[in-house]
Image (tube, rainbow, N blue to C red):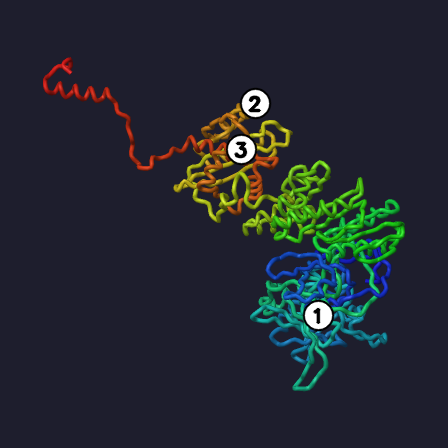
């Protein structure tokens, strides 16, 4: 690491090249730790160096941890996510990589003769000839020669050249280690085809060799292709005689062999594909830090190419910058625990040491809890609930005031954090002091939610949801995921996370952790137990289908148009079958309306009379006729506030619930809006459901409890019946 300079290139965790943008001075006698991987590699890291690791065996959650925190005893080893294969351009090579691999595995060190079994030799020679090389037999049946390429092997320092007194050795030239993926795979295939074995049962590839340099090259080749490679050292024996050390490299990779009998057995790894690390203290060393320009701030280190972290934080860079603005400034940095607050404190302090010339000040006192600067500045670190008395601040930073879901949902903990904020933290701020709150919005009643309710007009809010919504601060289109515009792959990962959480019934976690807009667990107007997502929706033929629309007829005012399609099954359960919701011009939502009518063929459709009379009605009718999207539309007058308008659908949901497809793409927005009603800004889906409820009240009649039809008495009918009896007896009607 100490040899790196600004402008040098390393690789990030995706295998993409990235640039070193900054290198620190050498820090003398820093506390260090040995970080050993299960691939047999070792890296010596500074105490405060960061790693992106997974500590829980059940949940795939990765967190940034400092090296010294990973040294603690725990039931599960820390896991580092497997890095992607190195993405490099093809290079011009003097020898085909496959031929080089074959020769390195079973070739003679002083000639181009290759050892091969009688069974494999015909295929192997045929493959080399297919690549354009000539082969010839020898007096030994298990040996054959490759003709016309000796000079190229000599030029790479691979075999001896007695005419020029040069001596070669078996090794992989550096140019081959950094070829394209296809070139590196071809090299590995040649090595495995000749000197590797493949387990028939598990498909694991093992390369065994007595040359450590060659075994290390195979391990690096496998890692550069994005697979985990294990390392074992042992002793080679022949007929009970010790023949020296032997090195085994094991890995899983479909396509690691080209020879058919081996290629058919190779497969990818599906268990523990990532790297486990073990951390132990070691003697103090001189260390350096680097920064890279990868999006994730991760770069690969060691022969096993383990991803490690180089991160920047609002809680680290900003306070260092703030203290440089003028003399005598004070900062308070708080977090959910004192340990985390001290961790941030150390990072800021280290940054000040590294950038002292740029910042214009240096450290004075260097304690973790309270340190000072040469320009009379001060930084105080404290955990939430900890003591801050005696310190006054021009800047207060709270980073993650709660540990996680359990604390965030606890009303006792919410109140404790709220009381600490006003009683301890806020009271220590100077008049005109700045505040920064960095947090995950776990619950509506968390610190951020309470501050927004109490003094929301005083705060500037920056919310970067994983999936873009309206008025996105980054300018993304609604529905677009973060980092979806490059090859980083994080956008696709977020999309997978959302689908997994929905399937697991954890949509609340998605809204809170990823979208930063928590919803009530229970709901207020609508209750969460009324929402009943299902794995399967009934067939259309078994349902009576209806529709409803809440139109946004005023374009450009930020309103949504929502169409909903509902159905009643034979048990009178209410199913939400489809939802269309967009901010769109009238031509677009009219087109969507016709699409839904033609697809679902509803019995009737509900809408508000005032909306449809505002000029869109004739256009809608014309489009329905042209597309033959026929349905009986019923207009309902706008009455009362939105809670009153939603009462009809609320009653149905309270009695029988609302059923819908658990995998529906609109599920997240729907549940968020329903459970947040009526406090949220947008309620168009609830309005449309309310109209559907009003339509169902008129379209579906009830039945008497007894099932008997009760008729009112008709006195005239009784009188004429009596007259008919008299006529039959021969008496006139006047005698009645």
Q: Which residue is mark 3?
A: 643
Task: In the rendered view, tell whether residue 416 sits above or below residue 574.
Answer: below
Element type at marker 3?
helix
Name the residue located 29 percent from the left edge and 34 percent from the top edge.
708
- Please state the horizontal and vertical placement of residue 617, each as a whole percent of the image: 53, 24
N-term-proximal mark, 3 vs 2: 2
Q: Which residue is mark 1?
A: 40
Name the residue located 72 percent from the left edge and 39 percent from the top edge.
459
Nearest to the eye among marks 3 and 1: give it.
Answer: 3
In which quadrant of the rendered view does residue 370 lie?
A: bottom right
Element type at marker 2?
loop
Q: Which mark is residue 597?
A: none
Q: Which residue is mark 2?
A: 615
Q: Tell me if mark 1 has few (under 14), some (14-19) or many (20+) residues whose alpha carbon lies within 10 angstroms of its own.
A: some
Q: CA distance from mark 3 to mark 1?
A: 64 Å
Name the residue located 67 percent from the left edge and 37 percent from the top edge.
471
- Please state the horizontal and vertical placement of residue 104, each as a whole percent of the image: 72, 72
């Amino acid at each position: 690491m100490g040899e790196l300079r600004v402008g040098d290139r390393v690789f990030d965790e995706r295998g993409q090249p990235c640039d070193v943008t900054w290198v620190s001075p050498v820090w003398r006698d820093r506390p260090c730790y040995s970080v050993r991987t299960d691939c047999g590699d070792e890296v010596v890291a500074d105490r405060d160096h960061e790693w992106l690791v997974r500590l829980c065996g059940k949940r795939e959650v990765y967190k940034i941890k400092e090296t010294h925190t990973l040294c603690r005893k725990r039931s599960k080893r820390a896991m580092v996510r497997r890095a992607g294969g190195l993405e490099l351009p093809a290079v011009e090579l003097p020898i085909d990589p496959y031929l080089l691999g074959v020769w390195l595995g079973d070739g003679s060190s002083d000639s181009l003769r290759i050892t091969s079994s009688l069974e494999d030799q015909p295929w192997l020679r045929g493959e080399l000839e297919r690549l354009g090389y000539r082969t010839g037999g020898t007096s030994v049946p298990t040996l054959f020669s490759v003709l016309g390429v000796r000079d190229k092997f000599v030029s790479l320092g691979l075999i001896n050249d007695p005419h020029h007194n040069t001596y070669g050795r078996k090794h992989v030239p550096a140019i081959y280690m950094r070829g394209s993926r296809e070139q590196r795979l071809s090299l590995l295939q040649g090595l495995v085809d000749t000197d590797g074995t493949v387990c028939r049962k598990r498909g694991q590839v093992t390369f065994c060799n007595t040359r450590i340099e060659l075994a290390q090259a195979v391990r690096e080749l496998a890692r550069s292709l994005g697979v985990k490679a294990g390392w074992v050292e042992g002793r080679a024996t022949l007929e009970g005689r010790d023949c020296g050390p032997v090195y085994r490299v094991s890995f899983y990779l479909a396509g690691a062999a080209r020879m058919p009998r081996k290629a058919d057995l190779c497969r990818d790894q599906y268990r523990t594909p990532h790297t486990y690390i073990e951390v132990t203290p070691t003697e103090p060393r001189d260390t350096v830090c680097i920064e890279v320009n990868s999006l994730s701030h991760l770069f690969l280190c060691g022969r096993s190419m383990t991803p490690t972290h180089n991160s920047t934080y609002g809680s680290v860079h900003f306070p260092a910058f703030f203290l440089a603005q003028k003399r005598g400034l004070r900062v308070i940095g708080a977090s959910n625990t004192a340990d985390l607050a001290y961790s941030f404190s150390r990072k800021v302090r280290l940054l000040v040491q590294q950038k002292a010339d740029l910042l214009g000040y240096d450290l004075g006192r260097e304690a973790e809890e309270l340190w000072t600067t040469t320009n009379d500045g001060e930084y105080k670190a404290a955990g939430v609930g900890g003591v801050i008395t005696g310190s006054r601040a021009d800047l207060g930073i709270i980073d993650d005031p709660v540990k996680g879901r359990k604390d965030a949902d606890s009303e006792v903990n919410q109140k404790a954090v709220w009381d600490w904020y006003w009683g301890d933290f806020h009271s220590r701020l100077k008049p005109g002091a700045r505040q920064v709150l960095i947090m995950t919005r776990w619950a509506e009643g968390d610190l951020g939610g309470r501050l927004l309710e109490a003094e929301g007009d005083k705060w500037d809010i920056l919310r970067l949801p994983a999936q873009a919504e309206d008025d996105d601060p980054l300018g993304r289109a609604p529905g677009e995921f973060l980092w979806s515009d490059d090859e980083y792959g994080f956008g696709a990962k977020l999309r997978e996370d959302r689908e997994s959480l929905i399937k697991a019934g954890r949509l609340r976690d998605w809204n809170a952790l990823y979208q930063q807009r928590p919803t009530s667990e229970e709901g207020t107007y609508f209750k969460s137990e009324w929402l009943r997502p299902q794995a399967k929706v009934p067939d259309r033929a078994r349902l009576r289908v209806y529709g409803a629309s809440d139109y946004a007829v005023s374009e450009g005012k930020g309103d949504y148009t929502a169409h909903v399609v509902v159905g009643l099954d034979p048990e009178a359960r209410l199913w939400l079958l489809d939802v269309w919701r967009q901010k769109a011009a009238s031509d677009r939502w009219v087109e969507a309306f016709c699409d839904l009518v033609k697809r679902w063929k509803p019995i009737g459709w509900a809408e508000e009379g005032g909306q449809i009379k505002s000029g869109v009605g004739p256009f809608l009718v014309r489009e329905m006729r042209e597309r033959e999207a026929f349905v009986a539309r019923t207009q309902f007058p706008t009455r009362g506030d939105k809670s009153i308008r939603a009462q009809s659908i609320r009653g149905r949901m309270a009695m029988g619930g609302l059923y819908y497809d658990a995998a529906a793409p609109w599920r997240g927005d729907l549940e968020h809006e329903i459970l947040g009603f009526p406090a949220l800004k947008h309620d168009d889906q609830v309005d449309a459901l309310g109209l559907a409820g009003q339509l169902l009240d008129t379209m579906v009649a009830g039945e008497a409890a007894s099932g008997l039809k009760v008729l009112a008495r008709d006195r005239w009918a009784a009188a004429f019946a009596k007259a008919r009896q008299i006529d039959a007896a021969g008496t006139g009607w006047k005698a009645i």
